[in-house]
Amino acid sequence: NLKEHNPYGDWETLSSLRRENPGKICPNPKSIEARTLSGRNAEDTGEKIYKYDTTSGFVCRMKDQRDRKCHDYKVRFSCSFDTCENVCWTKWYNRDHPSGSGDWEHLSALRKEKHGGDLCADPVYVEAVTVEDEIPALKTGQKSHYYSPGKGFVCHNKDQRFDKCRNYKVRFGCSCRSVA
């Protein structure tokens, strides 16, 4: 997040993010997602976005906004999994369904259940897709409560605009040397 260093807006450029996070962004990202720090999709803010692509990254310029202000954004990139070197993937887990408050595919619950021995100690990647048709979670248009290797994936029904969460499954990517 480079906003406090740039008086012209919020500039989450791919080149700057790569400098700040060496080796952590794949060479050719497939997609980009931008959200405000409070979790709103960039598309839902009403702000005019100057750049929003996998080549440049994300840029919100203050001069393009009516009030001359931009939200503070965070971005993440999706990469094809064949670009991840030395990553071994677990099997898919589907421990919950979206009835009740949402779909809770979180790592701590999987560890407490019968799957603890199948999971590596420190996952470095997580992938969530729909159970029915294996659509990546980032492509469904649904908001996730969290989506991280250290926590897993959680979708709250109350955060969805029109319907409840889809039914998701997850798998974790681990350093090959840490998988049993």
Image (cartoon, rainbow, N blue to C red):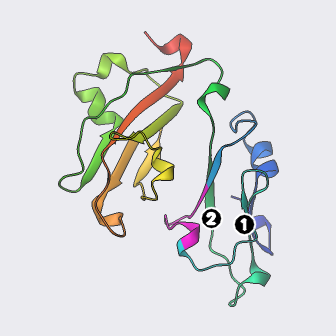
Question: Crowdedness of circle 2 by 10 Å Cα count: few (<14), some, many (20+)?
Answer: many
Write the residue at 35% across / 65% down: 159
Q: Circle 2 sits in a helix, a strand or a loop, which is it? A: strand
Does residue 53 appear in this view? Answer: yes
- Dots 1 and 2: beta carbons under 8 Å? yes
Q: Give the range drawn in magenta.
A: 33-43
Which numbered disc, 1 or 2, marks the residue that appears first in the sequence? 1
Residue 41 point in image, percent of width and height: 53, 66
Please determine whether, in this image, residue 120 is positioned above or below residue 79.
above
Does residue 151 appear in this view? Answer: no
Judged from this view, the residue extending furthest toward the front is 133
Residue 93 included in the magenta stretch of the image: no
Q: Indicate the quadrant containing the N terminus: top left, top right, bottom left or bottom right.
A: bottom right
Residue 80 point in image, percent of width and height: 62, 34
Write the residue at 17% across / 55% down: 100
| 156 relative to 146 in the view: left or right | left
Please determine whether, in this image, residue 168 is positioned above or below residue 36.
above
| 112 relative to 42 in the view: left or right | left
Residue 27 point in image, percent of width and height: 76, 36
Residue 72 point in image, percent of width and height: 63, 69
Q: Quadrant of residue 162?
A: bottom left
Write the residue at 33% across / 41% down: 132
Which numbered disc, 1 or 2, marks the residue closer to the eye?
2
Please determine whether, in this image, residue 165 is positioned above or below residue 78.
below
Q: Which amino acid does label 1 sit on?
A: Lys
Look at mark 1 in the image and give the residue it sits on. 3
Look at mark 2 in the image and give the residue it sits on. 73
* Badge count: 2
Judged from this view, the residue extending furthest toward the bottom is 66
